[in-house]
Image: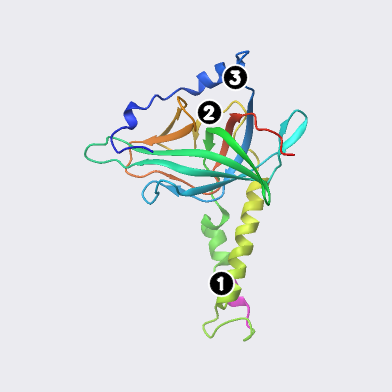
Amino acid sequence: MFRRSSWWALPFVLLSSISVCGQMDNAPPVSKVFATLSNSVELRTAVVGDELALITLADLIVDKQVAIPKGSRLVGRVAGVVPKGKNEPKSVLAIRIEKAIIAPGREIELQAIIAAIAAPPDPLDSDPTYAMLHSNEPKMISSSRTTSSTGGLPASSKANSNAAVATAEIKGRMDEPLLLTEESQGVSGYEGITMAWHLSMPPPLTVFVTKAKNLKLEAGTQMLLRMAQPRIAK
């Protein structure tokens, strides 16, 4: 856990060092996997221990077998939060990756860093034309059994609709083209954010730094993870 004034003393290691270590004879193999962030994380509201989830965008193959299938859930945690203030020149958000959930009751512990991120493309509903065309969709249903007196959907229908939209959005993100390559590193699409890595002791941490007072990674952000090669689940 970070103390408010201790992050400057952390021994950060550049990603290039990870690549070098991965090529050493006595170093374990390094696996790479692409994933998308399914819930946003924001420094202003984050608390150490908060969970974040990623969905893998491709199979992770180990020894010609699928170790982590596409669509698996990766679980991470907020490991440190340092807001910019009088005695803190920068805002810092640290994240650790804990495990992969490949099926109900089947999990794989991970030692991983986030090597690169790419901001998500603007969603369709941020387009003014799209918003105008779809702003009255709920009121187009006129049956008294399915709408309230104001023309909106009843609460149960809204809940089902929201759940369906969330599921469709996650599936849509999985089918989007990759914005990163296996050689990517650092930050793309977010201004003023840099990355560092704390590797001197487990678990490894990915550290996001900005001079701004807040730092937010949006849901849908694509990520490239590098990890110690996971064991194949039996």
Q: Work out whether mark 1 precedes mark 2 in sequence or the reverse, and give the earlier one.
A: 1
Instruction: Give yes or no for residue 180 being in the magenta stretch.
Output: no
SS class of the residue under badge 3? Answer: helix
- The residue under label 3 is which amino acid type? Gly
Residue labelled with disc 3: 22
In the image, residue 133 above or below residue 124: below
Give percent across and percent down for residue 157. Answer: 60, 74
- The residue under label 2 is which amino acid type? Gln
SS class of the residue under badge 1? Answer: loop
- The residue under label 1 is which amino acid type? Asn
Residue labelled with disc 1: 136
Q: Work out whether mark 2 precedes mark 3 in sequence or the reverse, and give the earlier one.
A: 3
Q: Quadrant of the C terminus?
A: top right
Disc 3 residue crowd, few under 14, some 14–19, many 20+, Cα 10 Å: some
Q: Label 2 vs label 3: CA separation?
A: 15 Å
- Left/right placement of residue 5 relative to residue 185 reads left
